[in-house]
Each structure stands twice: as C-alpha cells, then as structure tokens.
Image (tube, helix red, strand yellow):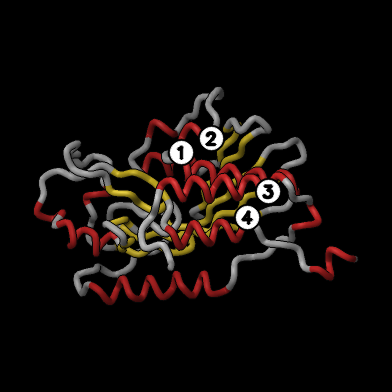
Amino acid sequence: MPREMDDPTAEAADTARIRAILSDLEDADFERLDPPADVWTGIEAAVASGAARSSKVPPSRDVTAGTVVEYSIDADDRVVGVGESWAAFARDNDAPELGILPPDRTIWSYFEGDEVTELWRLLVERVRTLQRPARVPLRCDAPAARRWFDMSISPESDGGVQFRCVMVFEEARPAVSLLDTHADRDSELAAVALCSWCARAQHGARWLDLEELVAELHLLERSSMPSIAHGICASCREEMSAELLVPARSSDASA
C-alpha cells in the first residue's frame, strides 16, 4: 500500500539506503540523463492551473532579463565565489545578510532540514565523482510571485562545483504573507513544511499549493503567521532518489 503521509523514520531509512547503494557503485553504473520532457510539461500545467484557480491573480510580470544567480564551492564545500547578480538577488529577496558570505562557512550551513541537506550532498557527491553535470528544475517563490528556476551543477577539475540558476518563468500573484520574511510569526502554531523542490506545503497527509494552504488554514484571517520548515514532499523525494540511482544502459556498460 502506498505511504499516504511522510514518516520521518522511513524517510531517514530511505536516505541511508541511497547512500549505501551509492557507496558500492562505480562510474560505469551511471549515465547522465536530462530530466524528462514531462517535467517542464508539469510546470506548464501547474502554471495554468494556478492561474485558473483565482481570477484575482494580476497579469504575469516580465522576468528580469538575464536573471541568473551563480555561485561555486571548493573541494571542502566552502562558498568561494558568487556571480555578479548574487548580492542583488539576496537583497531583492529580503536576505541582505547573504550579500557577502564569510569564507569559513560551508554551503551546507545555509540549508535547513537534514533530509534536504543530505539529498543535496548526495547530488553534489555524484557530480564530483562522475565529473558530469546535473540539471535540477525547482521552484523558489517570492511572496508575490511564483518562480521556476533551472539549476545546473557542474564539476570543476580541482574538486570544486559550480551552481548556476536561471529563472525560466515568473508569475505574479496576490502576496502570500507566509513567505514574507518580515511577517510576525506565532511560535505556538505548528510550523508549515515547504517542499524545497516544488514549493508545495504540507497539510496533514497532503501537499498543497500555497494558495490552497492559505485557504485551508485561514491564514488571511490571522495577524501572525506560522514558522516555515523546509523539507521535501514524497513525490519529489522519489524523483530525486531516481535521479541519484539512474543505472547505465547495458549496451554502454558492455562497450
């Protein structure tokens, strides 16, 4: 029977299993595959359904030309370089403290949630080991906009890894206070888990679009918001696990 809600113990076991399998694999066991075309079809469908849910959604605004965020880490996972747009992007997203990063912090110290951190570690480890780039489509919303990014992760010869995020679509919407970093937070309310890949929010056994969650929890009627915890939904976890465990074609392995 499929698991209807996320079990933290089972999730940890899944991650441990992935790491154990990866430790026994060699380069010949893998091949690089781009995400299937239906990933982007799904994004387009989500955009269309989101717009159809509310006639109050304002017209989509243009994506800033050349919106690209780049950064790189060294062999010890320390952030050693950022692109020209880094500081501006941090400032525009209410995180000016990230404009200048200290040289002694690893990239993982900026992550929230053990499972999310572990999956990204495994992905970076695979890129380094195979010396092959990976591509990850993901959501990173602002309070008043839905945003889709295309991230590429590329290995460097010295053990470093470069990350390049390109905004591929941005759609304006009525502001969601839950995502506003300046909103008052009520520590007595249960934290809302947001998927770090698809930006859906967990509500009991379901993962909902943010607008649906706002309606379910009556957040528009509250003067303070619950806190946010970053995680990963079951469907995205399965997709990421599959991405990490793609086997090589038998014909390639025997060549």
Q: Amino acid at mark 1?
A: Phe
Instruction: Determine the residue positioned at 27% across, 41% down.
Output: 181
Q: Earlier in the sequence, mark 3 or mark 2?
A: 3
Whole-angstrom CA distance, mark 1 to mark 2, is: 7 Å
In this view of the protein, which residue sits in the foreground, 165 or 185?
185
Q: Residue furthest right?
A: 255
The answer to whether residue 20 is visible is yes
* Residue sitting farthest toward the top: 104
Task: Give above or below for 204 relative to 23.
Answer: below
Q: Nearer the viewer, mark 3 or mark 2?
A: 3
In contact (CB < 8 Å): disc 1 and disc 4: no
Rendered location of residue 240, percent (x, y): 55, 57
Q: Is residue 71 above or below residue 175?
A: above
Q: On the image, numbered disc 4 is attached to which residue?
A: 244
Q: Which residue is mark 1?
A: 111
Callout 3 touching callout 4 (CB < 8 Å)? yes
Q: CA distance from mark 3 to mark 4?
A: 8 Å
The kind of secondary structure element at disc 3 is: helix
Percent position of residue 232, x then y: 43, 52
Dot 4: element: helix
Question: What residue do we see at 37% from left, 63% from top?
Answer: 4
Query: Pointer 3 and pointer 2: residues touching (CB < 8 Å)?
Result: no
Residue shown at the point (24%, 64%) measured from the top left: 212
> Is the Cβ of the residue at disc 1 closer than 8 Å to that at disc 2?
yes
SS at badge 1: loop
**Circle 3: residue type:** Leu
Q: Alpha-carbon distance for marks 3 and 2? A: 22 Å
Task: Give left or right: position of 15 versus 56.
Answer: right
User: Where is mark 2, residue-wise?
Assistant: 107
